[in-house]
Amino acid sequence: MIVMMIPVYPLFAQHTGEEMEQDLRISESILEEMFDIRTNRFVQYHRGGDGVAGQYIPGYGIHFRINAALDSTPEAVRVNVTGHAQIERAEEPDSTQKTKNERAIVEERFMDYFKNYASLLRNIPDSEFVRLSFGVGVIPLQGSFFDNHHTGRPTLTAWARMADIRSFTKGTLAEPEFENRIQVEDLSSVETPTDQDVFRSILETAMEKADVEHIQLRRTSGPEYLNGFGLSYQVSASLSAFPFWGEGLRDLDIRVDSLATTWSDALQTIGQKLTPMAVRIDSMFNPGKYNGNTDSLISAYQDSIRESTRSLRIHLEKENLPDEVVRKEISAIHDKLADTVADYGHTLRSLDDEELLMITIHWNSRHPEMPIRSELRIRKSELISGTSPEIRVIGKE
């Protein structure tokens, strides 16, 4: 019987992992509908990126980050014309009351999810949690970081134990008691402990010294601390700084020479139109200094285009680096990250022993050897005991 059961375990683990991945994607879709401007009108996602991202962390549970913000579009202005134009604007509501109302909206959606949809998550132990975080910290989007932490905006996190979710679904836990067991925390006014900011500086400095030539590590964002869960930092990495107009040109299939010619012609035409205006403006402040023949805006535009074209060509060549070069540099960054956490992680005094230190590297590149992200997850108690951090790599499908 033992021999017959041996092959069952890996098959069961694989099946369980596939079910959990499916459940995560379904829950992300549900939360996107619940926090979507097209259906609710009061929420807007930042441009690009995932609206909702869920992740299973063994030993803790599932954490969903809702990358959204309440719509702050001002009310339309009403113009009355009665002989002369008169502009009227409704009075701004009390900011404190507005914040309370916005928080109530987010909490209502949280409760709706916990009561009606969280039970759809299978294969999660009763002792683990389901957690939702709205407008928390910074969210990586297409290689950039956008800070949601604006004064007066609700920044909330809520969590419930899986055992309580299942009990409520089965009817063995009354609704008022279940609501009391769902913990909600407002992070809008929480101050960041000094040791967490110091660790971010340590992390940035150490990662900059990684032995790599072609991969650029950008600014580290965070810290993002969630009580009872842990501390998170996000790092963005790419093969090179993308010139010209940033990440937006990554997906364009272009010929560099024709691009340069097109933009050079266009900007030269613009320069010809702007030069007379520039002469008049500059002459007002610097009489006799400006020489339209030698200091023209056209030359400045052309120099800028030439430099941008050169940088763009270099970047596109780097995207075609040999696979073994990219793999070696990724490995060097992983080693530097693990060593830094092992050497300095114990300085995070504000982190409880059973809370997690989480560092995610987001790889922004089309190169086939570049993964989607790398995740380091380790408990504070494991750091203190000398456990070596492990890094999980999520590759492209």
Image: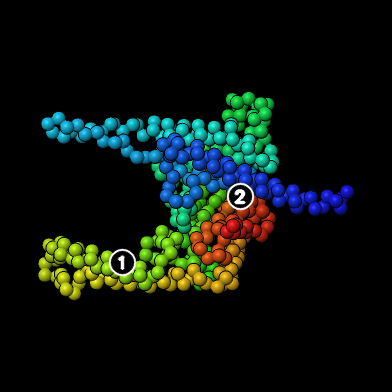
Left or right relative to 100: residue 376: right
Q: Which residue is at 54% across, 68% downward? A: 210
Q: Which mark is residue 356?
A: 2
Q: Which residue is at 65% across, 37% downward? A: 162
**Quarter location, residue 388:** bottom right
Left or right relative to 116: residue 91: left
Q: Are marks 2 and 1 in contact (CB under 8 Å)?
A: no
Three-letter amino acid code at the position of disc 1:
Trp
Quote the CA–CA distance across marks 2 and 1.
49 Å
Q: Helix, strand, or loop for circle 1?
A: helix
Q: Position of residue 340 (x, y in %)?
A: 58, 62
List the residue tagged with mark 1.
263
Q: Position of residue 141 (x, y in %)?
A: 47, 53
Q: Is residue 359 above or below residue 95?
A: below
The colouring scheme, among rainbow, by chain, secondary structure or one colour, is rainbow
Q: Is residue 313 above or below residue 1?
A: below
Q: Which mark is residue 23?
A: none
Q: Which residue is at 61% across, 61% downward? A: 338
Q: Position of residue 293 (x, y in %)?
A: 16, 73
Say which quadrant the C terminus sits in. bottom right
Q: Residue furthest bottom?
A: 294
Q: Helix, strand, or loop for circle 2?
A: strand
Would you say residue 185 is visible in this rendering? Answer: yes
Query: Mark 2 against mark 1, which lies toward the viewer?
Result: 1
